[in-house]
Image (cartoon, rainbow, N blue to C red):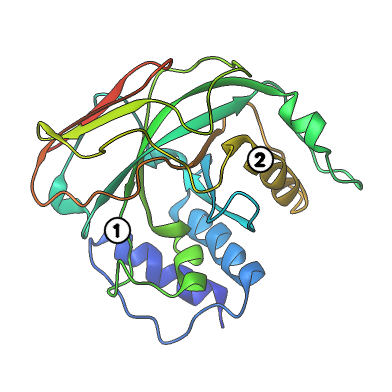
Amino acid sequence: MNHSSLAALLVDAYQNRRTISPEQIPADKPASYAVQQEVLRLRGAEVGGWKLGSKSSTGPIQGAMLPADCLLASGAELEFAAYTKPAIELEIAFRLNRAFTPRDEPYSDAEVLGAIGSMGTTIEIVASRINTWPKVEPLLSLADLLNHGALIVGEFIDYDAAFPFIEPALSFTYAGEDIVPGDGVNPAGDPRRLLPWLVNHYTSQGLTLTPDIVLTTGSYTGMHFPTEPGVAVAEIRGLPGIGFSFI
């Protein structure tokens, strides 16, 4: 598969608000990650964040780099029609307090976890460029930045290692309707376990992970699919509230 060709199709779909049906898919995860890098290169976009996730507390981890122009502050207004079948998810994100540069030996969990500097709430807007969404072949989904549409980023506060990351109390409403009954659970378990993987994945490609990059770590609420414009309002107890509007 030609990485540049698939990346060009995905970028064209993003820019022209359409979906595509690629004839080929990446052969493996390294190929999907190569497409991700090419997507950002063709868009002329800096890396503003990473989305990370795992389907279980011990399962494999994967992620996608997020274009800086897709990270928006809480209170943002977005055009509902700009996204195909958009879904919204409530997450916790981190920033590190130091840069991680490429080196020969992997970074240890202790090195990475000891560098968590701040944390905050994010809402991801999930919207694929693939016309079978929300059912997308996993390697194609990975190449398409894991179906990333935009990331609403709330206010960050100092990191608290005692925070109840496994099952925090939260609220999430859309258009005045409660869309999350009960407390949320992240399928990855403690989301901090995802961070060492990301640091080593990123630096192994010869890239430096800088403290400004937002690392969002998977949904506590699953995906909710709005059917019309409205206002999303959320709070994870202990963190500043967050919201945005689809118009």
**Left or right: 244 in relation to 163:** left
Q: Residue at x 57, y 33 (%)?
A: 213
Q: CA distance from mark 1 to mark 2?
A: 34 Å
Rendered view: 5 above or below 15: below
Question: In this view of the protein, which residue sits in the foreground, 230 or 212?
Answer: 230
- Structural crowding at the residue carrying mark 1, measured as other residues with C-alpha within 10 Å and reported as few (<14), some (14–19) or many (≥20): few
**Left or right: 83 in relation to 221:** left
Residue 193 is labelled as: 2
Q: Residue at x 62, y 35 (%)?
A: 192
Based on the displayed image, in which of its 4 quarters is residue 106 positioned?
A: top right
Measured from the top left, where is residue 233 in percent x and y?
A: 22, 27
Outermost residue, bottom direction?
Answer: 23
Q: Are marks 1 and 2 in contact (CB under 8 Å)?
A: no
Rendered view: 117 above or below 219: above
Rendered view: 21 above or below 124: below
Q: Which residue is mark 1?
A: 15
**Left or right: 228 in relation to 24:** left
Measured from the top left, where is residue 230 in percent x and y?
A: 10, 37
**Amino acid at pointer 1:** Gln
**Amino acid at pointer 2:** Arg
Q: Secondary structure at mark 1?
A: helix
Q: Residue at x 48, y 76 (%)?
A: 5
Q: Residue at x 53, y 29 (%)?
A: 165
Q: Quadrant of the N terminus?
A: bottom right
Measured from the top left, where is residue 82 in percent x and y?
A: 19, 52
Can residue 99 be seen here?
no
Rendered view: 81 above or below 194: below
Can residue 195 be seen here?
yes
Question: In this view of the protein, which residue sits in the foreground, 108 or 166?
Answer: 166
